[in-house]
Image (spheres, grey):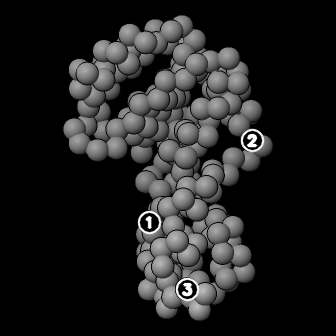
């Protein structure tokens, strides 16, 4: 199968968003009650980054500017060219969204957290609790994987080894979806090509 026909290609998978029961309002109300400082906690592939991205717009709709930072590669800290301008640009009321906070390590985390106090809030993603109070624990289930795959391929999902993929990838939905991409990529090209 050619890449543009693969139902698990990146653009299609990224279009599938976090399933937040009740929408973002109850979660953001809780975030407000926590003093706008909290963490989305969960293992890799549980949807933390997607949810963090999805919350930016409703946070802005509540009147808070949003500043985003992400640690997805080495080095595991922000260099001076990023750090100083990022914090100097924080206005009162700004909510800082930090993805992969655990990559900072404890001492750099403390410095980042201290600098962010001049903002109006801090929401992070992290694998284990402890850096900030837990706003939401992100979890996956085999049923969630099935729901996501059904959104991408319809009834064809019934014929896929979804429970096996969920177990094999220890609940990491991102890795399970990558495996499905590979499974479809190995298929013969369609007659339309």
In space, the residues marked 1 and 3 are separated at their CA atoms by 28 Å
**Helix, strand or loop under label 3:** loop
Mark 1–mark 2 Cα distance, whole angstroms, equals 25 Å
- Whichever of callouts 3 and 2 sits on the residue coming sooner in the sequence is 2
Taking the view exactly as shown, the residue that stands out farthest to the front is 193
Residue 68 x %, y %: 47, 29
The crowding category of the residue bearing disc 2, from other C-alpha atoms within 10 Å (few below 14, some 14 to 19, many at least 20), is: few
Among numbered discs 1 and 2, the one appearing first in the sequence: 2
Location of residue 45 in the rendering, given as x and y in whole percent from the top left corner: 47, 56
Return the residue at label 2.
Answer: 23
Residue visible at 61% across and 55% down in the picture: 15
Quarter the C terminus occupies: bottom right
**Viewer-proximal residue among 18 and 185:** 185
Residue 4: horizontal and vertical position, in percent?
A: 52, 71
Disc 3 marks which residue?
Answer: 193
Q: Nearer the viewer, mark 3 or mark 2?
A: 3
Q: Which residue is mark 1?
A: 175
Give the secondary structure at mark 2.
loop
Taking depth in this image into account, of 40 and 82 the one nearest to the observer is 82
**Label 1 Cα neighbours within 10 Å, binned few <14 / some 14-19 / many ≥20:** some
Image-quadrant location for residue 107: top left
Q: Helix, strand, or loop for circle 1?
A: helix
Residue 48 in the image, given as x and y percentages of width and height: 52, 45
Q: Mark 3 packing: few (<14 Cα in 10 Å), some, or many (20+)?
A: few
Q: Nearer the viewer, residue 65 or 6?
A: 6
Measured in 3D between alpha carbons, the distance from the residue under mark 3 to the one under mark 2, in whole angstroms, is 40 Å
Nearest the viewer among 79 and 44 is 79
Front label number (1 vs 3): 3
Q: Is residue 138 visible?
A: yes
Is 167 drawn above or below residue 28 in the view shown? below
Q: In percent of the image, x 38 and y 14: which residue is there?
A: 87
The relative height of residue 78 versus residue 153 in the rendered view (above or below) is above
């Amino acid at each position: 199968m050619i890449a543009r026909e693969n139902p698990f290609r990146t653009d299609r998978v990224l279009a599938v968003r976090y399933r937040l029961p009740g929408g973002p309002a109850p979660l953001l109300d809780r975030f407000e009650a926590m003093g706008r400082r909290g963490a989305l906690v969960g293992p890799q592939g549980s949807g933390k980054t997607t949810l963090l991205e999805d919350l930016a717009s409703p946070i802005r709709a509540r009147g808070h500017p949003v500043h985003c930072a992400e640690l997805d590669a080495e080095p595991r800290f922000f260099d001076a060219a990023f750090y100083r301008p990022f914090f100097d640009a924080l206005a009162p009321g700004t909510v800082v969204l930090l993805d992969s906070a655990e990559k900072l390590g404890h001492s750099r985390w403390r410095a980042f957290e201290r600098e962010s106090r001049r903002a109006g809030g801090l929401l992070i993603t992290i694998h284990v609790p402890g850096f900030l109070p837990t706003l939401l624990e992100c979890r996956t289930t085999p049923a969630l994987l099935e729901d996501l795959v059904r959104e991408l391929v319809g009834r064809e999902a019934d014929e896929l080894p979804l429970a096996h993929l969920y177990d094999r990838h220890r609940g990491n939905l991102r890795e399970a979806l990558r495996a499905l991409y590979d499974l479809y990529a190995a298929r013969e090209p369609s007659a339309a090509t």
